Image (spheres, helix red, strand yellow):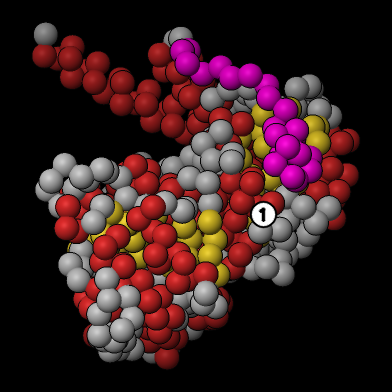
């Protein structure tokens, strides 16, 4: 009879999963032993959070559930940051943790903790099979739960003796294919009617558009109706930023042209985009109070959250776009004057950024570094972005040109995750160049994953903005608190760290060194770290954050004064 471990691997393969992201531990030895004798690829990493980050990024870029496998106890607790990141990013990760033997439950066994209770707040569903014969059912259920409706992570705890026990071979109930929900014709016609009435419309595509796999439909729709498009999240690059109707980031913190455009718009069509903190929770500072708002989302609870909408449509974004195209989306008023105004906003913002990029002082200004990086990047390069001022300058200056080629941290803002994300991005796109763009503070979290990149011969290019500190927090503290604390780091030679792991690298101190360094990095065939020495400089993102904090502080002081 097969063991639980054999049933687990057999079911994994039947579900179409071909990679296991893992970090070895005693609870996993039975299942990893079976996996090693199968045709599954085992990607073993150096930290359990990085394991789940990589599975999360792999799920996002492939649009399919991905499997992480970690040991119990501290392996499980380490993985929770990755789980929480995937949860807020709505990413279908199947996160499996081993545990102490089931026979020793509640008996003060080694590493015995309530793993399911810990996971429940940050997953869609969590459970534990209590016998080997239950593994196929629970794993198949986990797969289904992870990608039905709004996607998200799920968790299974599987005790080591359940993996080791024998059981009769059990059939797997594979998930049934379902048609994505389509909008009602009444809603489609109403949406087009409201759109026709508008004079200054805007379309915002969020990650839901990416999951709907609607690249062609989104492009066709905006071209038919002559509509300006802004993208955010995994939708970055669905329509290239250099398309005449695409106006870049739908994030006013990074794109001042976006902010000005939003303030003058009288109509918003939100496609798979939550009305969340990036849209100011629907406040008038971002979306004018009088603007008509239509929201399309597969998750009904999102419709009208934080801001009333004129029409909420629970549907798959691709199905909504197809329905609007078929219903005559091209029969729209002349949008030329409005589009010309938005192009003016974009031109002004590009000129503002260009002024920063002319800075030639040393240490280097991040805005001056990016034009050189972009000049040297291969045209098909895919990007994994971290967090921090160096990265935010890059996000403001860099166009998104490839669908699925712009991977961010997600709404949890888990800095450091860009390196494991980049590893997953490269595994999913082995024939394309991948750059990981991070800061010196962020890199410290998962720097040992350079070892993973070397072991799997993944020629990532790691570009590190090194300002010897937590630059964004240093700027926020200085501006808002008037002092700085716990913000300074050493100016470490991260290129030498990469070399010690078996990769390569170099330090860049002047602008003329950037272009050739990036070219050498992509030609090296190795994980290559470019350690760029920069100075602290507030990014547009940080300036926006400071201004918001100043407004909040003034409001609090006003309330306090009125109460006295």
Is 525 in the magenta? no
Q: Is residue 556 above or below residue 521?
A: above
Q: Position of residue 417 (x, y in %)?
A: 50, 46
Viewer-proximal residue among 136 and 87: 136
Is 488 in the magenta? yes
Left or right: where does residue 326 sit relative to residue 242? left
Query: Which residue shows up at 32% across the image and 50% down it?
Result: 72
Viewer-proximal residue among 488 and 211: 488
Q: Tally the marks.
A: 1
Query: Which residue shows up at 38% across the image and 76% down it?
Result: 6
Quarter of the image holding residue 316?
Answer: bottom left
- In this picture, which residue range is highlighted in magenta? 484-505
Circle 1 sits in a helix, a strand or a loop, which is it?
helix
Residue 355 appearing in the image: no
Q: Is residue 354 above or below residue 5?
A: above
Q: Position of residue 250 (x, y in %)?
A: 48, 54
Q: Position of residue 32 (x, y in %)?
A: 45, 64
| Quarter placement of the N terminus | bottom left
Query: Which residue shows up at 53% across the image and 65% down it?
Result: 42
Q: Position of residue 418 (x, y in %)?
A: 55, 47
| Quarter placement of the C terminus | top left
Query: Which residue shows up at 46% across the image and 13% down it?
Result: 485
Quarter of the image holding residue 10?
Answer: bottom left
Viewer-proximal residue among 256 and 471: 471
Q: Is residue 213 above or below residue 26?
A: below
Packing grade of label 1 (10 A; few <14, some 14-19, many >=20) is some
Q: Is residue 317 above or below residue 236?
A: below
Q: Which residue is mark 1?
A: 455
Residue 491 appearing in the image: yes
């Amino acid at each position: 009879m097969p063991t639980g471990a054999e049933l687990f691997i057999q079911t994994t393969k039947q579900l179409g999963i071909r990679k296991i992201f893992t970090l070895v531990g005693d609870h996993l030895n039975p299942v990893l032993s079976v996996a090693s004798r199968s045709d599954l690829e085992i990607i073993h990493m150096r930290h359990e959070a990085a394991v789940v980050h990589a599975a999360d990024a792999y799920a996002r870029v492939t649009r399919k559930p991905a499997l992480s496998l970690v040991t119990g106890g501290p392996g499980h607790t380490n993985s929770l940051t990755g789980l929480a990141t995937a949860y807020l990013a709505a990413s279908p990760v199947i996160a499996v943790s081993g545990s102490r033997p089931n026979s020793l439950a509640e008996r003060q066994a080694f590493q015995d903790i309530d793993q399911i209770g810990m996971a429940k707040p940050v997953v869609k569903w969590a459970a534990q099979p209590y016998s080997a014969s239950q593994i196929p059912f629970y794993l198949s259920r986990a797969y289904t739960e992870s990608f039905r409706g709004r996607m998200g992570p799920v968790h299974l705890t599987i005790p080591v003796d359940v993996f080791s026990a024998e059981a009769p071979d059990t059939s797997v109930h594979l998930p049934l294919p379902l048609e994505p929900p389509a909008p009602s014709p009444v809603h489609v016609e109403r949406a087009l009617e409201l759109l026709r009435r508008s004079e200054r419309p805007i379309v915002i595509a969020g990650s839901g558009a990416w999951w709907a796999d609607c690249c062609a439909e989104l492009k066709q729709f905006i071209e038919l109706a002559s509509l300006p498009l802004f993208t955010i999240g995994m939708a970055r690059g669905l329509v290239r930023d250099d398309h005449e109707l695409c106006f870049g980031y739908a994030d006013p913190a990074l794109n001042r042209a976006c902010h000005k455009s939003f303030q003058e718009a009288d109509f918003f069509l939100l496609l798979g985009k939550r009305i969340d903190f990036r849209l100011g929770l629907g406040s008038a500072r971002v979306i004018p109070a009088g603007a008509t708002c239509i929201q399309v989302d597969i998750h009904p609870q999102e419709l009208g959250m934080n801001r009333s909408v004129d029409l909420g449509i629970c549907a798959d974004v691709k199905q909504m776009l197809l329905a609007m195209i078929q219903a005559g989306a091209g029969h729209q008023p002349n949008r030329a004057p409005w589009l010309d105004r938005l192009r003016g906003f974009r031109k002004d913002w590009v000129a503002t950024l260009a002024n920063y990029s002319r800075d030639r002082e040393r240490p280097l200004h991040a805005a001056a570094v990016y034009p050189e990086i972009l000049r040297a990047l291969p045209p098909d390069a895919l990007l994994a972005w971290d967090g921090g001022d160096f990265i935010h300058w890059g996000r403001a200056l860099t166009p998104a040109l490839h669908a699925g080629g712009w991977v961010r941290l997600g709404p949890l803002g888990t800095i450091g995750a860009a390196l494991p994300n980049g590893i997953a991005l490269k595994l999913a796109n082995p024939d394309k160049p991948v750059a990981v763009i991070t800061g010196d503070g962020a890199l410290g979290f998962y720097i040992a994953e350079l070892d993973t990149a070397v072991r799997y011969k993944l020629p990532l290019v790691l570009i590190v903005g090194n300002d010897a500190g937590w630059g964004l927090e240093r700027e926020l503290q200085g501006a808002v608190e008037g002092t700085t604390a716990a913000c300074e780091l050493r100016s470490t030679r991260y290129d030498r760290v990469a070399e010690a792991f078996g990769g390569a690298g170099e330090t860049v101190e002047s602008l003329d060194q950037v272009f050739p360094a990036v070219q050498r990095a992509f030609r090296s065939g190795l994980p290559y770290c470019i350690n760029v020495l920069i100075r602290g400089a507030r990014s547009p993102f940080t300036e926006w954050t400071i201004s918001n904090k100043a407004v909040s502080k003034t409001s609090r002081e006003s309330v306090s004064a009125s109460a006295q």
